[in-house]
């Protein structure tokens, strides 16, 4: 019996030595455990909390679907969630559209000192996020830089009021704040493209535009997708930027959730709104990935 157990142990040890994946997971197991506890445990608490009730400051630990029912019964909640998805999608589109040319220029046209360009791209991250948001508030304000410049040039007779406290201000501020996050993955994807493929396309008679559409863009899609996800997912739940530059017309779902956990003291409803928001974002991401696959098949 003892010899059989030793034989089994020896087999396990031999399998462990031969399998690189098992050894890799063993080395990563402490980090993976910390990540799972840091991500999964709060989600479990949030999910459980969404089925409870709250009366004043007391949490009533009884199962109820009232919090989810409130979301569908009160029109304001799903309208704000729809607005958040729409604003974040527009931020994603604007950010990636502006980030791609710069990433393309650095990858294909900058021959020397590319690291300097990368450092210049990341300079906005050297300052506080709040400072960047406040700077846009100063720029877009009623007496801000834009209005003051236009007034001094005589192009307008009174300050423009539509620049601040609306979705437009939220989009501009978020696009600037997340620009570097979009540029870097696109640049890495473009940098990995084999230049001989582009040269072969041009040698076969394809124009520069056709080469970009049929060769460069499909090969850079992993970076574009990563940029889209890195911009879209966090901006849906952003509440700082809408609170500072969005006004009443730029409120997003993050502001509602923050108020539920803050002034409203309705943690279960805030948890339910958070779960619904995460599920909605997951569905939107799946649609985005599906649309990307269809585009890639159509191009190829």
Image (cartoon, rainbow, N blue to C red):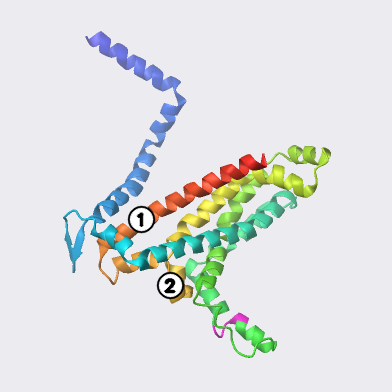
Q: Does residue 145 belong to the magenta stretch?
A: yes
From the image, tell me which residue sits under label 2.
243
Could you tell me which residue is drawn at 53 percent across and 44 percent down? 290
Of residues 199 and 69, the one nearer the viewer is: 69
Q: Which quadrant would the C terminus be assigned to in this image?
A: top right
Please determine whether, in this image, residue 17 is positioned above or below residue 183.
above
Q: Does residue 20 belong to the magenta stretch?
A: no
Could you tell me which residue is drawn at 65 percent across and 55 percent down? 100
Could you tell me which residue is drawn at 31 percent across and 11 percent down? 7
List x then y, in percent, for residue 29.
37, 36
From the image, tell me which residue sits under label 1.
276
Could you tell me which residue is drawn at 29 percent across and 58 percent down? 68
Q: Which residues are magenta?
A: 142-146
List x then y, in percent, for residue 13.
36, 19
Q: Classify residue 180 by image quadrant.
A: bottom right
List x then y, in percent, for residue 202.
81, 41
Please determine whether, in this image, residue 235 is positioned above or below residue 262.
above
Q: Is residue 219 visible?
A: no
Q: Classify residue 57 by image quadrant.
A: bottom left
List x then y, in percent, for residue 183.
61, 55
Residue 90 — which label?
none
Helix, strand or loop status at disc 1: helix
């Amino acid at each position: 019996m003892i010899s059989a157990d030793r034989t089994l142990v020896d087999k396990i040890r031999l399998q462990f030595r031969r399998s690189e994946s098992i050894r890799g997971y063993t080395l990563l197991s402490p980090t993976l455990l910390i990540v799972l506890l840091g991500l999964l445990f709060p989600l479990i608490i949030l999910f459980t909390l969404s089925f409870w009730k709250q009366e004043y400051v007391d949490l009533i630990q009884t199962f109820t679907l009232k919090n989810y029912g409130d979301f569908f019964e009160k029109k304001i909640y799903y309208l704000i969630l729809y607005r958040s998805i729409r604003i974040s999608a527009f931020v994603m589109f604007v950010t990636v559209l502006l980030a791609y040319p710069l990433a393309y220029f650095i990858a294909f046209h900058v021959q020397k000192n590319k690291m300097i360009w990368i450092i210049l791209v990341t300079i906005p991250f050297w300052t506080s996020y709040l400072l960047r948001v406040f700077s846009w508030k100063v720029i877009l304000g009623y007496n801000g830089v834009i209005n003051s410049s236009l007034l001094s040039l005589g192009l307008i007779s009174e300050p423009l009021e539509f620049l601040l406290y609306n979705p437009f201000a939220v989009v501009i501020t978020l696009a600037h704040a997340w620009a570097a996050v979009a540029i870097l993955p696109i640049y890495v994807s473009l940098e990995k493209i084999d230049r001989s493929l582009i040269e072969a396309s041009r040698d076969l008679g394809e124009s520069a535009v056709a080469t970009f559409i049929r060769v460069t863009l499909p090969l850079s899609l992993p970076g574009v997708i990563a940029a889209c996800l890195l911009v879209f997912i966090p901006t849906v739940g952003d509440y700082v930027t809408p609170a500072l530059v969005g006004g009443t017309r730029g409120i997003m779902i993050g502001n509602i959730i923050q108020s539920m956990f803050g002034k409203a003291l309705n943690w279960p409803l805030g948890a339910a709104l958070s779960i619904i928001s995460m599920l909605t974002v997951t569905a939107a991401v799946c649609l985005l990935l599906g649309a990307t696959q269809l585009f890639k098949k159509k191009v190829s």
